[in-house]
Amino acid sequence: MSRSKSAIQEPTVISDFKEITKMRLSLSVVFSSLAGYLLGVDVIDLKVLVLLAFGGYFMVGASNAFNQIIEKDLDALMDRTKNRPIPAGRMSVNTAFVIASIFTVLGIIILYTINKQTAMFGAISIFLYTCVYTPLKTKTPISVFVGAIPGAIPFMLGWVAATDNFGIEPGTLFALQFFWQFPHFWAIGWFLFEDYKKGGFFMLPTGKQDRGTAVQVIMYTIWTIIVSIIPVFGFTGELKLSIVAAVIVFLCGLFMLHYAVRLFREMTEKAARQLMLVSVSYITLIQIVYVIDKFIR
């Protein structure tokens, strides 16, 4: 009897741990960091690669846990979040705080063993996400702009981990992921508009599912495309892109732009959801193309 009960409870504990740290999101962020590292490194150091993966996961997991502690009452109001561990009563705030604190300390220590700048940017990311972005979400649409800063750090963090230097190269990687986040999160804010409204979150730039928001989605998608092909022109130091890779990147951007324009035309939640899914595929493909191009160029 006790074994059966344990078997039932164990997946719940594991799934709650995954949820409080948002494992899938954290792993996608780790992927970005590793891509940035491969772009910046001359000789791959597996030790640094592993440290970056664990350190990056701990930092993102900590940010997500702190976020869910702060927003626990609002999460209880929304359909998509009401079953999270804290609002559902499966995890106490104290437990979540311990997890977040341990992850923060471990993350900073691990990233510090790579180099000081990597640890610094990791710490800045946690601070901005937890202490600035999270409180602003219920006050102003500018929160998306603030949240895009820690969200853009992972890609360039990998380069900094590889080179211990912040310059035009990681700055370009930062800019690429920074601009990409606006159409991505506005698409999410669009198709979850009614649910977000229950929690009092302001995610769309105009505060409404209107043409103004759709136009800005298109404009930031265009900026994303422009930044993504800049390395082909030789302006970005050691960060380079071949003509073939630039064409592939550009075509991927046009594909995402197509869905941004579709949102403008249709103004539907379905179109917004499609744009969100395409944007996730876009940023992943771009990073893969950048890395492959470096090693075969």
Image: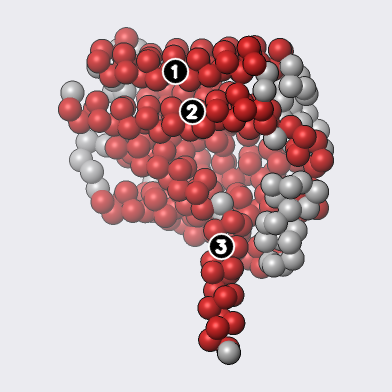
Q: In the displayed structure, does residue 99 sit left or right of residue 189? A: left
254 up-or-down from 189: above or below? above
The three-letter code of the residue at mark 3 reads: Ser
Q: Which residue is located at x 55 percent, y 25 percent?
A: 275
Q: Return the disc, 2 or 1, that comes first in the chain's sequence.
A: 1
- Coordinates of residue 278 in the picture (x, y in percent): 49, 28
Q: Residue furthest top?
A: 233
Quick one: label 2 or label 3, which is nearer the N terminus? 3
At a point 46% along the width and 38% down the height, the residue shown is 154
Q: Which mark is residue 268?
A: none
Relative height, residue 16 to residue 153 (above, below):
below
Local crowd at mark 2 within 10 Å, few (<14), some, or many (≥20)?
A: many
Front-lying residue, 93 or 286:
286
Report x, y in % for residue 147: 63, 34
Quadrant of the frame with the C terminus: top left
What residue is disc 2 on?
278
The three-letter code of the residue at mark 1 reads: Phe
- As helix, strand or loop, the secondary structure at mark 1 comes to helix
Provide the secondary structure element on which disc 3 rests: helix
Residue closer to the observer: 143 or 215:
215
In the rendered image, which residue does mark 1 sit on? Answer: 255
Which residue corresponds to mark 3? 15
Image quadrant in which you'd find residue 33: top left
